[in-house]
Image: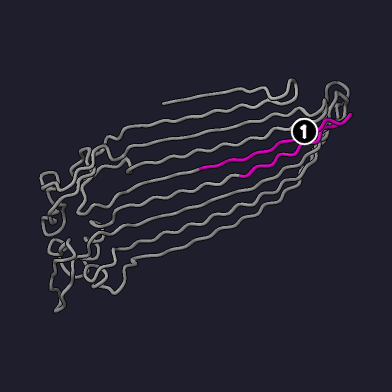
Amino acid sequence: TENVMLNIPLVQDVAALRLVGTDKSIDGWIDRKVLSPFPPEVNNSTARGDVANAPVAQDFRHSNWERLQAGRASLLIQATDRLSITAGFMHQSLTQGAPNTIDSPPLNEDHYQPFDVSEPFEDKFNLYSLTGKYNFDAFQLVSATAYWDRQQNQTQDISEAMHNYIGGFFGPPASWPFLTTDTVTEAGNTWFGLGAGSITEDDYTRQFSEELRLASTGDGPLQWLVGGYYSSFGATSHVYSFYPDTNNGFNADFGTTNLADNNRKIDIDQYAAFGAATYLLPDHFTA
């Protein structure tokens, strides 16, 4: 882990900048193993085969490694005795080679696959902020503006799950082949092994907000606050699952490489107005 912080006075008593950075790496503890051949299910297709003792074709050690990179900057400007402005920016990026999950069975620190389908994860976040304050003689004006966006991308292997699910429609999953070059005859039809399938989810969210408020200052008996708030939130999500475009396998069986495709979109706008006033009465009563 590396952390650094730097304070920079730009103009004496007027402007200053702070910079902070982080770079952190965490080693993985789960091995991703590709088996060949992948063992068929046992006990009339009710239990997983003995993956722990199957031949290993590829071994990806410590596959669930993580890396975090982040930085932020804050700029303060004291333009006059009455006016101050603070601007901020933060960025964070998290990448991971594989999820922190193990297989059950056999509940060891390994993840077993019939094909080499990587399962990366990425999460990026940005935050921008701008706050201005102006002090009048009897009240203070504050404007707080912010915007953030976030993007998440992840892929997971569905080869074994879809082999069991789709194969179960036609017969025992244990008799359904994994390899696209192998075939099985069910109900008078010849089917290919499905092959390597994956599901990917891409999510993007963002929000803008603005708050403007006036607040009384001083120690008079009347204290008041009025303001308004607006925010706009948006999110899109794309989930899709596919198999490689080959002349056999899933494409030959069903005439498409696309198992599923789902797009979702959300937009939410919010408006608010607020106000409060208090008056100090005798004997420490407040209205």
Q: Position of residue 194 (x, y in %)?
A: 22, 65
Examine the image and state in which quarter residue 138 appears.
top right
| Residue 136 is covered by the magenta coloring | yes
The answer to whether residue 156 is above or below residue 240 is above
Q: How many marks?
A: 1
- Please give the name of the residue rendered at 76% of the width and 47% of the height, measured from the top-left corner: 273
| Residue 261 is covered by the magenta coloring | no
The answer to whether residue 190 is above or below residue 175 is below
- Please give the name of the residue rendered at 38% of the width and 55% of the height, measured from the top-left corner: 200
Of 146 and 8, which appears nearest the observer? 8
Quarter that holds the N terminus: top left
Residue type at tag 1:
Lys
Quarter that holds the C terminus: top right
Q: Residues within 10 Å of mark 1 (few under 14, many from 20)?
A: some
* Magenta stretch prevailing secondary structure: strand
The answer to whether residue 128 is above or below residue 49 is above
Q: Position of residue 95 (x, y in %)?
A: 40, 41
- Please give the name of the residue rendered at 53% of the width and 38% of the height, measured from the top-left corner: 91
Q: Position of residue 240 (x, y in %)?
A: 39, 61
Q: Is residue 279 left or right of residue 252?
A: right
Start-end of magenta stretch: 125-147
Of 77 and 280, which appears nearest the observer? 77
Q: Is residue 171 left or right of residue 286?
A: left
Q: Which residue is mark 1?
A: 133
- Please give the name of the residue rendered at 65% of the width and 54% of the height, measured from the top-left corner: 269
Residue found at the far front of this picture = 10
The answer to whether residue 8 is above or below residue 105 is above
Q: Position of residue 226 (x, y in %)?
A: 80, 40
- Provide the secondary structure element on which disc 1 rests: strand
